[in-house]
Image (tube, grey):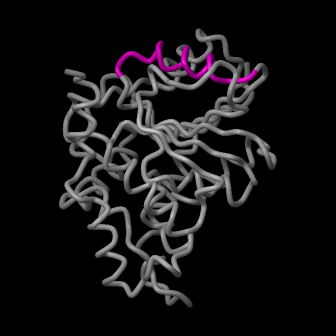
């Protein structure tokens, strides 16, 4: 039995996630044949600051049309589709949660992006890709679920082309500060493997990467949380699409509150970084 795979599928997986997403869209009057990426933005960018953060990362890396990007821990595929649509990249999403893979493929078809984005179910610590296959590897809010980080960064290095880039947007923990649970990535400490920012940098540089950019973006994260409620009340010209609560389950509101509280109390921080080989 693969305990890592089983634990993540147990935490993130849901029965018939595709059906739940379809029904949530139908309740809002959204139909697959006319769906856009914008309709899905509140659902498929499962990380703090959502679409805004993904665009920021693409700009940080200076992504160019035709580059091959690997999104590890790709979830429902929102970031992969954003980078493909807005930067012209060819993107592969690697995801270990079976229901996420099925839903990502469904959403890809809905918005007509199957030629630019594809998804593969697999373990980021032991990838099936060839050596030197990608120009950039992206990871957003993924590393906190990986206990032994050395194999992950070794694999990322292996699949990157010479001078390739590692783009991160991750949550780090502070020394000796317990979290308020549940949070989006864990119901308790059994699958939460946060490191401090310094520890994370050490893991990455030990794998042979050189740091080009490192920023603590916790304030941006808190500002984003503070702006969520007013944004939800704004009148828009299109119906709002389904939100991430469909993915996070019945305790989604509690997970979100705890995440915000952990940020405010300095128990966690959000970092954004770019490394190269």
Between 111 and 160, the one lying in front of the other is 111
The range drawn in magenta is 147-161
Q: Position of residue 172 (x, y in %)?
A: 44, 32
- Image quadrant where residue 9 sits: top left
Q: How many marks?
A: 0
Between 162 and 181, the one lying in front of the other is 162
Q: In what quadrant of the picture does the C terminus appear?
A: top right
Residue 247 falls left or right of residue 238: left
Is 64 situated above or below 211?
Answer: below
Is 167 situated above or below 21?
Answer: above
Residue 68: within the magenta? no
Residue 79 falls left or right of residue 116: left
Is 57 situated above or below 205?
Answer: below
Identified at 67% across, 51% down, the residue is: 56
Residue 150: within the magenta? yes
Q: Position of residue 59 (x, y in %)?
A: 74, 49
Identified at 48% across, 20% down, the residue is: 152
Identified at 74% across, 27% down, the residue is: 212
Is 243 situated above or below 66?
Answer: below
Between 177 and 240, the one lying in front of the other is 240
Residue 75 falls left or right of residue 251: right
Q: Position of residue 193 (x, y in %)?
A: 33, 26
């Amino acid at each position: 039995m693969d305990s890592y795979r089983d634990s993540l599928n147990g935490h993130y997986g849901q029965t018939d996630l595709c059906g739940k997403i379809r029904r949530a869209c139908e309740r809002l009057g959204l139909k697959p044949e006319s769906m856009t990426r914008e309709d899905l933005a509140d659902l498929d960018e499962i990380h703090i600051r959502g679409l805004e953060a993904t665009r920021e990362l693409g700009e940080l890396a200076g992504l160019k049309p035709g580059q091959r990007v690997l999104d590890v821990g790709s979830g429902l595929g929102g970031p992969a589709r954003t980078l493909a649509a807005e930067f012209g990249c060819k993107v592969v999403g690697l995801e270990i949660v079976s229901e996420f893979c099925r839903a990502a493929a469904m959403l890809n078809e809905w918005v007509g992006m199957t030629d630019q984005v594809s998804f593969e179910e697999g373990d980021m610590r032991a990838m099936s890709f060839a050596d030197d296959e990608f120009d950039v590897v992206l990871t957003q809010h993924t590393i906190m679920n990986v206990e032994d980080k050395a194999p992950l960064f070794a694999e990322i290095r292996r699949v990157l082309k010479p001078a390739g880039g590692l783009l991160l947007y991750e949550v780090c923990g502070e020394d000796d500060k317990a979290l308020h649970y549940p949070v989006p990535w864990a119901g308790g400490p059994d699958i939460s493997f946060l490191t401090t920012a310094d520890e994370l940098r050490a893991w990455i540089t030990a794998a042979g990467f050189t740091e080009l950019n490192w920023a603590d973006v916790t304030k941006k994260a808190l500002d984003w949380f503070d702006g969520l409620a007013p944004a939800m009340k704004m009148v828009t010209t299109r119906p709002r699409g389904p939100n991430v609560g469909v993915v996070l389950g019945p305790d989604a509101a509690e997970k979100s509150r705890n995440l915000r509280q952990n940020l405010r109390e300095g128990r966690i921080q959000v970092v954004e970084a770019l490394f190269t080989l």
